[in-house]
Amino acid sequence: MTKYIFVTGGVVSGVGKGVTVASIGRLLKSRGLSVSAVKLDPYLNVDPGTMNPYQHGEVYVTEDGGETDLDLGHYERFIDTDLTKASSVTTGQVYSSTLLKERRGDFLGGTIQVIPHITNEIKERIAEVGRQSGVDVVVAEVGGVVGDIESLPFLEAIRQMHREMGTRNALYVHVTLLPYLGATGELKTKPTQHSVKELRSIGIQPDVIICRSDRPMGDDLKDKISLFCDVERQAVIPLSTVDTIYEVPLILEEAGLGEYLVGKLELPAQPPDLEQWRTMVERMKSTRKQVHIGLVGKYIELHDSYLSVVEALRHAGAYNDCEIVIDWVDSESLEQNGVAEARLGQVNGIVVPGGFGSRGIAGKIRAARYAREYKVPYLGLCLGMQIMVIELGRHALGNDEPNSTEFDEHTRYPVIDLMPEQRGVAAKGGTMRLGTYPCCLVPGTKAAAAFGEPVVYERHRHRFEFNNDYRQLLTDAGLVISGMSPDGRLVEIAEMADHPWMVGCQFHPELKSRPTRPHPLFREFVAAAKETLREGEQVPLPIGDVGG
């Protein structure tokens, strides 16, 4: 029987529930247990696929093509497992499914209510994650904060599940904030007490309270929270802010959380093995040489819009014994003359990530041109590959007419065009080319050398593709097609022949990078960027002296 850990949040949002859930998963997996996770999101959208990144951060894509919350990225990276779309449950999905059943007559004319119909649908979806994966433990995160109206049906559902399963098969973890009051110079527990009181009013008594704070928490506060929140003292877990999120599992393990969880749930656990994880964290914290990466995006005001990209760079940095310093470059700013040279002249590598719409595209094209002309290592992700192709097409033809039909549907030279299967698609949500597809690598290319195997499987999220009508023009201009779909129709990876390292891929490699196993393209990109440093220095070589 799969056992469940339900994680709720209190006081404020953004307190770190997602990383906590991921860390709990890592602690359990380190003990030889199989683990999965599920995010319960209270918003009415069916999924975040149609949301502006400023609303919800990046859209994380699962192997089976689910467009999900970014927290699933944390789960996958920490637990080192591939989740499915079943691990993302939203209010929109729950109500849509329930109303569809009502329209079919499944409820035999009965009145549809939040309890039991909506809560039953939520419980069924949570249980499905356990049935589908067959794991020992499912960790379920309820999005938002206790007290939000939107989350009440989810809290009621997990209350019912806990009651039905019993205390040996389910428990509650509450993640809360201890704010620091500068006037008195102390951490305050009263918001946590009120948060737990709110939970208890709806029938949920936390078994564990994880106390987030920016300063160390003393034993006196631990005693106080234990007393007033009716939680065992050893189940009050301090979690101070750390330099890297990958340190969180080690802190929780040291605080005794792993042993407490397996004891309460009576799990057949082995002694924990976190040595590889500890070694990885030590490498991240001990690296000294800095490599500056210019991340050229259009949503840079919210860094979570590129969360997986940043984490993949950090994984690759640890592997290459260097610290990654992100230079956040607004692509629109590069549209002004001279700005690209000024902003990109001090970076060791350039990443152009995915995105949609024409805003900021001219600046991204200038970034690709700069990388090509000055031999700066470049990694193009999805749109970033298309930008690389557009820029090379303009260079080859000597004008600015080559474009993508996404940005100019009447362009004379559509080097990037809508995929044939996307023509006539009207609905926006969940209709792109989504999920994992195979890619056959071309021997002798940089991509093939990075992967070290003939066929790889990568995750996609796009509607537009490389237009094969211009393949000859672009290859004559120096483009190398280094990865194709098995039928030879879709260009999956392209790179520049006369360049130290300029590679673009139609898929999203950042989604499959892991802290102990960085993605090959990120690993080799960071290695190439590191090569641009002067010996013993942390600044790039002068323009024109790189590669060749």
Image (tube, rainbow, N blue to C red):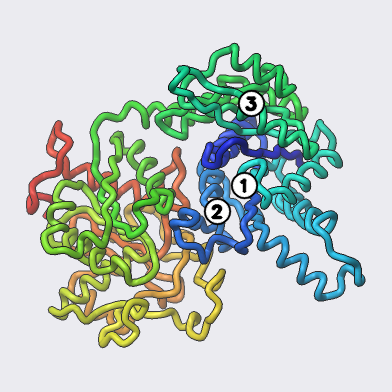
Is residue 374 shown to the viewer in this render? yes
Closest to the camera, between mark 2 and mark 1, is 1
Residue pointed to by mark 3: 258
Q: Earlier in the sequence, mark 3 or mark 1?
A: 1
Q: Residue at x 92, y 71 (%)?
A: 108
Q: Which residue is mark 2?
A: 69
Q: Is residue 465 left or right of residue 411?
A: right
Q: Amino acid at mark 2?
A: Asp
x then y, percent, for residue 266? 77, 28
| Left or right placement of residue 492 versus residue 273 in this view | left
Q: Residues within 10 Å of mark 2 (few under 14, many from 20)?
A: many
Which residue does the image show at 70% across and 37% down from the upper left? 5
Estimate the spatial distance between the alpha carbons at disc 2 and disc 3, rounded to whole Å. Answer: 26 Å
What kind of residue is marked 1? Gly
Q: Secondary structure at mark 1?
A: loop
Query: How far across and down, in percent of the image, does residue 57 sit?
Result: 46, 53
Vertical arrangement, residue 505 with respect to residue 166, above or below: below
Query: Could you tell me if the residues under marks 2 and 1 are in contact, i.e. CB atoms within 8 Å?
Result: yes
Q: Is residue 446 left or right of residue 263?
A: left
Residue 250 in sight in this render: no
Q: Residue 472: where, in percent of width, then height?
A: 25, 80
Looking at the rendering, which quadrant does residue 393 occupy? bottom left
